[in-house]
Image: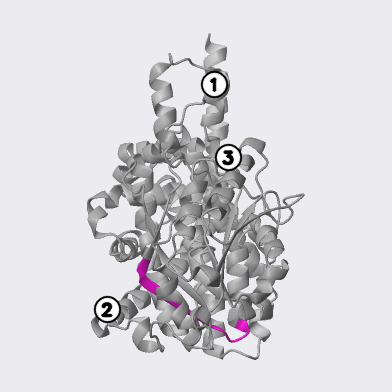
Amino acid sequence: MDLNIYFDHGITSQIGLFWQQVRAPLLVPFLKIMVILCLAMSLMLFVEKVYMGIVIVFIKILRQKPEKKYKWEPIKDDLELANSSYPMVLIQIPMYNEREVYQLSIGAACNLSWPADRILIQVLDDSTDPITKGMVEQECKRWASKGVNIKYEIRDNRKGYKAGALKEGMKHNYVKMCDFVAIFDADFQPEFHFLLRTVPFLVHNPEIGLVQARWKFVNSDECLLTRMQEMSLDYHFKVEQEVGSSNHAFFGFNGTAGVWRISALNEAGGWKDRTTVEDMDLAIRAGLKGWKFVYVGDLKVKNELPSTFNAYRYQQHRWSCGPANLFKKMVGEIASNKKVSIWKKFYLIYSFFFVRKIIAHIVTFIFYCVIMPTTVLIPEVQVPIWGAVYIPSTITLLNAVGTPRSFYLLIFWILFENVMSLHRTRATFIGLFEVGRVNEWVVTEKLGDGIKVKMSMKASKKSRFRIGEWYNKVHFAEVFVGLYLMLCGWYDYSFGKNRFYIYLFLQGMAFLVAGFGYIGVFVPNS
């Protein structure tokens, strides 16, 4: 018994001695350097947010609507020319096994207010499910029987995914008669006046290559997950896109709910599938050719937010990995471009890419979920209060202005964004170093009204526990970080003086809740 006590005491002493030997010469200097780097990145993000906040205030005060900045007047009917005064518009609707929502987008496109002989609707169906494919084709035939000029196009393969489908769609001979192309994802439902609001910008301003509308979310109140997404995306559309359009006549194309001038699209090199953000890729190339972009913030197009956590994680991987990978591929091309000003090149490289697409993700996770908790265990390293409290609080408040109705959910939003920063940071590094899932493309699941059907099916069936389903539901990275934060919180509460433990316990719980899949709606297997 005494020997066991001596052995246990010896092991404990050895671990303690090793910790002391490593902490002073290695961990403390390393942690101090990381704190300095993270504070520098926080300041960069802070300045960017304040700058955009100031600009958006002036935009609102001066009421700088795009209709005032650019020439805009409605396209008028001409008795002599008949409908020839209206340009020929192509509508592209790419879809992939969109059984729940295909009727919404096709129906909305077919009901757009535009002369029937001056519009051409192209449904680009990459579906692999034969039943879904048959349903989509039948829907196209139904609208064609009503006199709508609609084409149902399929491919032999899914090469290039969405970008490949759009590129293939542009190769058809009938596209040559079109001047502009509007793109809508399968869950997007434009209002009848969409073309009447957007196309005049392109008709009367030959320097404009793209007109982008805002997204409106039909299921934002479905669950807490969709409310959190609404807060993040509202800031993007109400601030980032507005500032880019107003100050630089440039912003990242959102891939849908926009109208391109076909000549601008072709001059930029058309669609490319080299990254998972083919829309941003096209926008950067067109911007470097000198084309201007217009964002119409008061024109909203209804669409659906992913309401399952897995669907949202896949989407965020694509949205974080793709821009980082594109930045790596295009930074040299942007820097050496001679058609745009130095100011615009600086905006693209530093503000648009480096701060918003890379720094924003990395500093959120590394600083607030790793470095700050670790300083609790190593009290020799201190984070100044302005870096730990004042800067993140200001950034959070500036983000919240986009969705004032959800201001009371601010704490939940902070915790949720920090959880997602783990996934986004990992995706960012994958994009920068081009490893692993760099080109992974998983179509974001849309539920439409299907969730109601599936939930009613669940109510009529007896719930059964399956080990495999439980295992697939657990996200181990989030669970590990959650446990680490809880450990740091316990240590700070018991021995520390930082009083970070309230934040650490809350953030740890948020990671664990997400890690075990208790967020978003649950869709039972049918």
Which element type, helix, strand or loop, lies under badge 2?
A: helix
Three-letter amino acid code at the position of disc 3: Phe
The mark nearer the N terminus, 2 or 1, is 1
Three-letter amino acid code at the position of disc 2: Lys
Which element type, helix, strand or loop, lies under badge 1?
A: helix
Residue 417 placement (x, y as % from top left): 41, 51
Residue 228 placement (x, y as % from top left): 36, 50
Residue 438 vs 341, above or below: the answer is above
Q: Which mark is residue 8?
A: 1
Comparing 350 with 215, the one in front is 215
Query: Counting other residues with Cα less than 10 Å from the Cα at mark 1, is it few (<14), some (14-19), or many (20 or more)?
Result: few
At horizontal 55% and vertical 44% (from top left) the residue drawn is 98
Query: Counting other residues with Cα less than 10 Å from the Cα at mark 3, is it few (<14), some (14-19), or many (20 or more)?
Result: few
Three-letter amino acid code at the position of disc 1: Asp
Q: Which residues are magenta?
A: 288-299
Any magenta on residue 182? no
Mark 3 and mark 2: span between their CA atoms?
A: 59 Å
Res 138 visible: yes
Mark 2 and mark 1: span between their CA atoms?
A: 68 Å
Q: Residue furthest top?
A: 1
The reply, left or right, for residue 320 in relation to residue 409 is right
Pointer 2 residue: 60
Mark 1 and mark 3: span between their CA atoms?
A: 15 Å
Pointer 3 residue: 18
The reply, left or right, for residue 421 in relation to residue 265 is left
Q: Which mark is residue 327?
A: none
Q: How is the image coloured?
A: one colour
At horizontal 56% and vertical 14% (from top left) the residue drawn is 4
Comparing 105 with 493, the one in front is 105
